[in-house]
Amino acid sequence: MDGDGETLANLLREERRFPPPPEMAAAANAGEDAFRAADADGDAFWAAAAARLEWAEPWTQVRDWSRAPFARWFTGGRLNVAANCLDRHVRDGRGDRVAFHWEGEPGDTRTLTYADLKDEVCRAANALLELGVRAGDRVALYMPMIPETVVAMLACARIGAPHTVVFGGFSAEALRGRILDCDARVVVTADGGYRKGAASALKPAVDEALEQCPDVRSVLVVRRTGQDVGWTDGRDVWWHDLVGAQPAEHEPEAFDAEHPLYIMYTSGTTARPKGILHTTGGYLTQVAWSHWAVFDIKPEQDVYWTAADIGWVTGHSYIVYGPLANGVTSVLYEGTPDTPHQGRWWEIVQKYGVTILYCAPTAIRTFMKWGEEIPGRFDLSSLRLLGSVGEPINPEAWMWYRHAIGSDRCPVVDTWWQTETGAHMISPLPGAATLKPGSALRALPGIRAEVVDDTGKPVPNGSGGYLVLTEPWPSMLRTIWGDEQRYIDTYWSRFPGYYFAGDGAKKDEDGDIWLLGRVDDVMNVSGHRISTTEVESALVSHPRVAEAAVVGAADATTGQGIVAFVILRGDGGGDTPDGELAAKLRAHVAKEIGPIARPRQILVVGELPKTRSGKIMRRLLRDIAENRPLGDVTTLTDSSVMDAIRDGLPAAA
Ligand code: WTA
């Protein structure tokens, strides 16, 4: 945890405190009672949370940890996720409630009620069945932020076909890898979507990916932008032709609580992304409960907005499954925050009367940079609660968010969780907690988190260490798709018996938790997880690159920026950095992985600092990338390497 000394010292000086607004405390969905109930009997607590859903068959056992670390929750229970998100609301008289106010980037809009959404999902479910999709078959989605994306996910859930949503910003290559890894036979996509004021194509990446995916038999294509698309007869079919022709009736089948719901790929410490598997009953239970408790959801009044992409876990849990299970009205926005102007988000909040906003610190820091007069031009008085997710939020960004967006009124809940955890794990409950800017405070009811030292012993208050989860939880990942050993090795081996999150954390004098960022080789760029190894292997796949080392360097806006040190092939090793080559390499990485992985900076060097065991010392490279004096160099094979690197760099580095 290099460079943490300073962070720790700054955080220790943070003494501002914000008790809950009295009105919120008085009407809160969950507070100290929930902690007491969960502490008294964890299984009974989660059983009560599960009872908020509708089950076709009751479970016989709440948690089964007998084959740890492979968990089963709500054994024997059966339910249908889509019926829980839609049918029961419609049946119980809530069909006319708006499920989504959708706002396209160009300004076109659609309003879908729960009844509308149910009809669309039934049609799409029938369409997938017609394409031969059966329970257990995987379906890949590569979509823009449009209602059909939600519809396709719920249609998959309805027929028990696990979906894997691949973020639309990923490359054809990344899409291909994911389709092959989970052996998806059907892909749902669109011609394109709107981003930054222009139509941005998606279908060409699907066509390119499928050149090497011979088992994909059907591609269902939504027409969103109307741009020209390549077409493979017999394989490609328009959504409006196939889905539009289906009946709006479909009888949902109940699936086992442990039936796979989806696979979400995320970066690990190796070049190969991990397929995180989530299942049905425990996932929906915890996602629905946490959404209701952490955001204090009042479904009759709230207009809820998660401003994130559905292609990430945040979108799965808190755009789709949590909000719909709770029957609340949400906003769904297609585009970027500065199109056509930098006040677009605030215009949307004003237009729809958004009451709860959930977004990432990187967005907040960008808005800070643009200036508080921009949100100041809009009426944000409908807001009552703000949330943050994806990376540590520094106290100044937290304060700005509360002040400039929340009018010094709205609590800010900093929610720590991961793709693997499926749902919030550490977060304040806004009606109960006294907030500390920059702290996620403590584990939610029913969750056990600890900060441990190298040997796995809990650290005393006032010290830092590694964040672990000491007990299983309902929405935990069940395994890594197709690789049980990697699941055990990655999460359960570093501290036997504990789930190792990969994050550093600190307990303050009150025992509250402050997250400090990753302790492994995973970077966090604008809230997106990218592995250093993944970018390194993309770089060395370029013919001019012999070796590469990548680090995440502190970045005022994006949290971390990707800085790559490369050694060129042949005699090129000692070349002066060549702007043109750097640009080519940056583009190459964007092509291989996706634009989010494009390095901020590429530095050509003659050698890389390595330990005697041959491990690259990224810590030292990070010192250089962040303009810091070098840390301990004694384990290097040759400490003069660092002088050579530093001397050879342009002044800007
Ligand atoms: C980081 C996103 C500090 C953390 C939901 C974690 C956070 C990784 C927070 C998971 C937070 C997420 N404070 N760090 N509130 N939320 N992180 O899988 O490093 O995309 O391990 O899930 O993001 O990222 P993922």
Image (spheres, grey):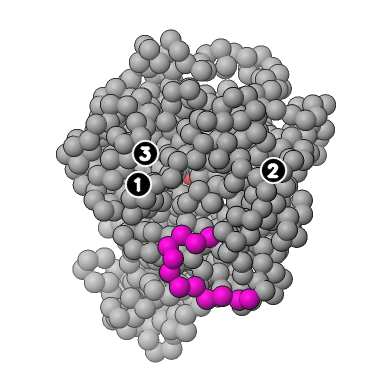
- Mark 3 — residue? 393
Residue 350 falls left or right of residue 417: left
**Inter-mark Cα distance, 2 to 1:** 42 Å
Q: Is residue 396 magenta?
A: no
- Mark 2 — residue? 249
Q: Measured from the top left, where is residue 234 in percent x and y?
A: 67, 74
Above or below — where is 505 with respect to 558? above
The tag on residue 362 is 1
Bin the neighbour count of mark 2 within 10 Å (Cα to Cα): few under 14, some 14-19, many 20 and up. some
From where the camera sits, is residue 128 visible?
yes
Magenta stretch, residue numbers: 222-233
Identify the residue at horizontal 46%, vertical 60% (top origin).
224
Which residue type does callout 1 highlight?
Thr
Above or below — where is 635 with respect to 467? below
Q: Nearer the viewer, residue 550 or 38?
A: 38
From where the camera sits, is residue 457 visible?
no
Q: Which callout, 2 or 1, points to the residue nearer the camera?
A: 2
**Inter-mark Cα distance, 3 to 1:** 9 Å
